[in-house]
Image (cartoon, rainbow, N blue to C red):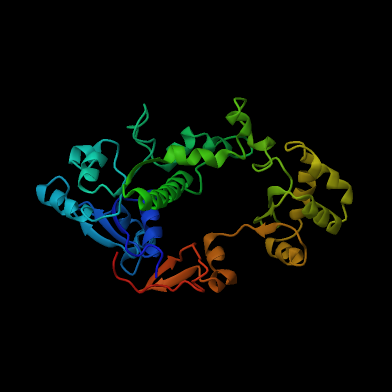
Amino acid sequence: MSKLSGIKVVDLTLFLPGPMLTVMMADQGAEVVKVEPPTGDPAREMEPIEAGESVWFRNLNRHKRCIRLDLKTAAGRDALWALIEDADVLVEGFRPGVMKRLGFDYNAVSARNPGIVYCSISAFGQTGEMAHHPAHDMAVQALAGFLSVNDTPDGAPVVPGVPSADMAAGLTGLSAILMALLGRQATGLGEYLDIAMYDSMLPWCAHIAGSAIAGGPSPLSRSQRSLGGAAFYQVYRTADDRYVVLGGREMKFVINLMNALNRPDLIRCAELAAGEQGELIDFLKTTFATRTQAEWVEWFADKDVAFSPVLDFREAFDQSFVQDRGLLFQSDGHHQIAPAIRMSDTLAWQAPSDKDA
């Protein structure tokens, strides 16, 4: 039996954080009813389109039963109440205050369904001076300090490649919901969960922003081991203008590589503080520029070093181990990413053939 069979979720979210949360529940057997506005989730129209549907929308909304309700009308509100009456979980992503104006705040909902776990996802939470400030992922990352270390060598911040604040909120919300469902087993009562993208993002900086967390100065990328100050956690250009990375700073990897390159004298440089390894970084820059990316992949094949080529998504998805683990599948003409959760009682995740979303 699927782990979340028997759990009913009413999903009032759009775009990314909420749908990512609820699709993970749907993949594990929860009944998820996605309530969209009359015009539908805007992600439905986001390109690229495959087999008549947005790849984005399909990957985040499979297994869900999608309906459209106008919550500004009495009929729409009555229909939502009917869904909520026997629901275990409600997830909403409106701006703070909207659900109360519609008549569906936690107090109203829990009065009818005391066992419901009610999760609100917003940019900055339901309280405080920033509660009503509009923001999507990049703005949250900027205010949380993360964009300051997502920078070029000259210190200029750049647009992040991953919507980390969105994803952090979705994962944090999922964890909180599962905790609340476990707690309900003992009390019979649900819970209200205030999940903010900003709050969810902050713990992700514990390993890089220690000095600031402790009340000191903010870290600079060039002096941080994980952000560009260390030779063995670094990106290098190859002869064909592609890139490779060294992604492990353990001394065993340093010793293995520097001996293979006949430069054991530079091993000592890797023991210096981040930001002081310029001699080693310069040597590796010069060295990696002498061969193509493919040639380095072949050269590293028999060496125990944390090394990887920098691939684009097409190359990443085409790797043989992606197919071996079934990380991509096709269903009804749609390419999808398989759930990342693998459990011991499931030897291989079986791709669905569903037409729900």
Name the residue at 87% across, 52% down. Answer: 263
Q: Position of residue 74 (x, y in %)?
A: 10, 47
Name the residue at 70% across, 40% down. Answer: 229
Q: Residue 337 occupies which quadrant of the picture? A: bottom left
Q: Is residue 324 above or below residue 132?
A: below
Task: Name the quadrant of the C terminus.
Answer: bottom left
Q: Position of residue 193 (x, y in %)?
A: 36, 42
Q: Position of residue 195 (x, y in %)?
A: 39, 41
Q: Is residue 16 visible?
A: no
Q: Is residue 277 above or below residue 308?
A: above
Task: Name the quadrant of the N terminus.
Answer: bottom left
The answer to which of 90 and 327 lies nearer the viewer is 90
Hey, which residue is sitting farthest front in the picture?
186
Query: For this view, does 298 lie left or right of residue 141?
Result: right
Name the residue at 41% across, 59% down. Answer: 24
Q: Position of residue 61 (x, y in %)?
A: 34, 60
The answer to which of 135 and 200 lies nearer the viewer is 200
Query: For this view, does 263 lie left or right of residue 94?
Result: right
Q: Is residue 141 above or below residue 2?
A: above
The answer to which of 269 and 195 lies nearer the viewer is 195
